[in-house]
Amino acid sequence: AKAGEMWALRDLAEADRDRITPLLEVMPVPWDFNNDRPAKSLRQHLQSLVPLTVNRWGLERAFFVDLVNIAEGDSVIDGKFGLQYVMDAYRNVGAQAIPVTGVGRGATYQAEVKQAVSADGRGACIRVTVDELGHPQRLWTYVSGLLNVLEIEADAVDLLLDFEMIRSSQVALVVSQAALMVEGLTEVAPWRTLTLAAGAFPGTLQNVGADTVGLIPRSDWAAWQSLVIGSGAALDRYPSFGDYGITGVEFSEIDPRVMRMSANLRYTADDAWVVL
């Protein structure tokens, strides 16, 4: 949910807006490196999120909102924790927000999700991380336990299998893992939606030299294509595609006093990003 990404949502063609559901991952409170303290309060940070969403995405279409980057113990505003504050604010303006959670979130966060599910009736998005995907035998146990905590049925859940960073050398392994996950999870529950998500854009462009044109393989897209239309694809249900766009998977905040600025242009081609 950075400014550039939100502008991009606003500028999408209507037909494209109908075909996607954005996942707005709220960034941590920015840091004031000069004074070694947060640049703003949590209230100030979250207050701008709702009007920004309404202006860039509107009220007609659903979207996911994830506060995984906001520390749970530090997020009390007017007696509310961060997610409750945000979901209440979205509800007040009529925005179609769907909360995102995961099996590793704390009890307070899960209680806020449960409250939103009950108040809005729009269900929830369960985001399964790459660490949890590494335990396929226990994954259904984890997820079904979370369904019980939230008191929600699977057909009201958008299940997001997030493999996070994928490199070219990992595509075949990810496809093999994803096929097992999709088949196994499809057999046990009728999920409202099922998405395979990953990212492949590097966290930095240090391998693209100045005054050059570099190609970065879209390994996330290659993995999804291989899973869905590859020669070995025989799934009962095909997952939607999700990605991290033209940014790295890991969030990092760099001290601007020591950062070397370098202008670059990023274009998405069929199977690679072209970086100038």
Image (spheres, rainbow, N blue to C red):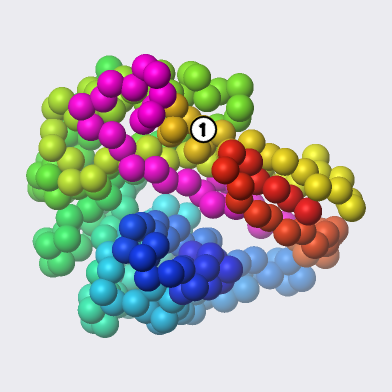
Quick one: label 1, few (<14), some, or many (20+) residues within 10 Å?
some
Depicted 243 relative to depicted 78: above or below: above
Q: Residue at x 51, y 32 (%)?
A: 222
Q: Is residue 272 magenta?
A: no
Q: How many marks?
A: 1
Q: Is residue 73 left or right of residue 34?
A: left
Q: Residue at x 42, y 45 (%)?
A: 242
Q: Residue at x 70, y 48 (%)?
A: 274
- In percent of width and height, residue 112 lies at 24, 59
Is residue 133 visible in this depiction of the protein?
Answer: no
Q: Is residue 8 left or right of residue 161?
A: right
Which stretch appears magenta? 227-254
Depicted 234 relative to depicted 129: above or below: above
Q: Is residue 231 magenta?
A: yes
The secondary structure making up most of the magenta span is: loop
Residue marked by disc 1: 222
Q: Nearer the viewer, residue 219 or 138?
A: 219
- In percent of width and height, residue 183 lies at 24, 23
Q: Is residue 179 left or right of residue 262?
A: left
Q: Is disc 1 placed on a helix, strand or loop?
A: helix
Q: Nearer the viewer, residue 122 or 26?
A: 122
Q: Nearer the viewer, residue 122 or 77?
A: 122
Residue type for callout 1: Ala
- In percent of width and height, residue 252 lies at 64, 52
Is residue 242 visible in this depiction of the protein?
Answer: yes
Residue 179, quarter of picture: top left
Depicted 132 relative to depicted 20: above or below: above
- In percent of width and height, residue 105 lies at 34, 45
Q: Residue furthest right?
A: 211
